[in-house]
Amino acid sequence: MAFDRRQFLKGTAWMGAAAFVGGCVSRGHLSGGGSMQGFAAGPIRKVRVGCVGLGMRGPGAVQRLSAIPGVEVVALCDLYAERAERWNAWLKENGKPSARVYSGEEGYKALCDSDLDLVYNTTPWQLHEPIARYAMESGKHVAIEVPAAMNLDECWSLVETSERTRRHCMQLENCCYGEIEMLTLNLVRLGKLGELVHAEGAYIHDLREGIYKSPEEGSYQGYWRLKWNVEHSGNIYPTHGLVPLMQAMDINRGDRFDYLTSVNSAQIGMLAYAREKFGPDSWQAREIPKSGDMSTTVIKTVKGKTIMVQHDVTSARPYSRINLVSGTQGILNDYPFRVAFAEKPGDPVHEWFGEERKNEVLEKYKHPLWKVAGEIAQKVGGHGGMDFLMDLRLAYCLQNGLPLDMDVYDLASSCSLCELCERSSDNRGASQDVPDFTGGTWRTTPPLGIESVDLSKMGLDAGDVGESSAQLNV
């Protein structure tokens, strides 16, 4: 067997009966620090960033962050020293100041203890919470790759640490900055779709080749992503399809998740792939994933809205995040992009807009952030530019002392599905209460507005940036 299951379970198992009984209650703000909703730290003129994890996502982050005026990558850390040294060399070759380099299993601690403002965490999933918690305890703001937490205990840990330390803890949910997701939010805020009633999101992406590819071939170190599929059922990667819908439906800002129910299909695709690719007697074929091919979850909100979320990384089907929002006046659905809405309340809607009208909507209602910085974002790259827009907006908020677009409660609510979906699917779809991580402040927190950046204030122009070479599209 290629990995030690007992050691893996030790680091990722749920927290037992105590978590099952106590995890789904609202703890209020037990940390004593008060709510982080609407929190704005003091302006940071030059945002000094330390990047932890330079395997798959970290290199792209180094390149993107280095393209933003007023942001400097001052520290690099990876388990393997050669990776950190390689990207420090890239910084110097591209006219950037040399960064401090750290390595080893606890190198992140020295990075967090050093002189910087933001820790950018792109490590494997099981390292997200401990590194983020240490960084906040060290007085640093934190941005964490998705999912930022893998169980309820980690969700609560990040919430309570952020509240107590008064440090930002943002999940790097790049899909909130996709062109269609931002168009959706703009249409919703303008009232074009009426009051939203139902939404659907997903992460449907055939990842079998990458999941089974060896680390020596540049894939997941120690097969860590495969391990999660072997050991866990439910939706272990819920945020890409879900968090943009949370913003559109005002989750944690006027409404919140109440409960969910989740079921899994049989596991067929991954096993078939492993047997065909590596042989029926291979260790890959003997490691039977607990995850089904398709996980389907339905969430009910306190105000009676519904959200369907799916996860499938093993079926032979094209990529989709679905991105469907349905309201009293209209509907938008992506993959492929379609839209229709009534011009006047009460008018019937029976057909999707034709190609000409659809293109008019794309242009007329384009989100201001995409109007201002879309050209630059597409040039830099990273999932069609949304990665860069995410980093750009994060930097702009930190530089100007503004609240971030996503806070620790958004992180916790979306990541809570990792455990709650598994509980539900393992118990014949039994409903699971979703905690109120906000401690009740969701009732009075205003919805996310239509936010942009002032490029002239940042000193950024399309001619100042080049295409990045380390951007992933997975």
Image (cartoon, rainbow, N blue to C red):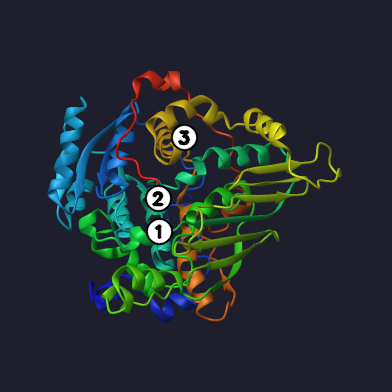
Given the image, on which type of amino acid does mark 1 rest? Answer: Leu
Given the image, on which type of amino acid does mark 2 rest? Answer: Val
Q: Label 1 belongs to which residue?
A: 207
Q: Label 3 belongs to which residue?
A: 402
Q: Label 2 belongs to which residue?
A: 474
Residue 231 locus on image (x, y percent)? 37, 74
Label 1 neighbourhood size at 10 Å, few (<14), some (14-19), many (20+)?
A: some
Label 2 neighbourhood size at 10 Å, few (<14), some (14-19), many (20+)?
A: few
Is 423 on the left-hand or right-hand side of 340?
left
Q: Nearer the viewer, residue 292 or 252?
A: 292
Q: Nearer the viewer, residue 24 or 265?
A: 265
Quadrant, the N terminus: bottom left
Cβ atoms under marks 1 and 2 closer than 8 Å: yes
Residue 309 falls in which quadrant of the image? bottom right
CA gap between label 3 and label 1 equals 37 Å
Assign a secondary structure to mark 1: loop
CA gap between label 3 and label 2 equals 30 Å
Residue 30 locus on image (x, y percent)? 45, 61
Mark sitting earlier along the chain (3/1): 1
Q: Nearer the viewer, mark 3 or mark 1?
A: 1
Assign a secondary structure to mark 2: loop
Q: Nearer the viewer, residue 202 or 40?
A: 202
Residue 95 locus on image (x, y percent)? 20, 24
Assign a secondary structure to mark 3: loop
Cβ atoms under marks 3 and 1 closer than 8 Å: no
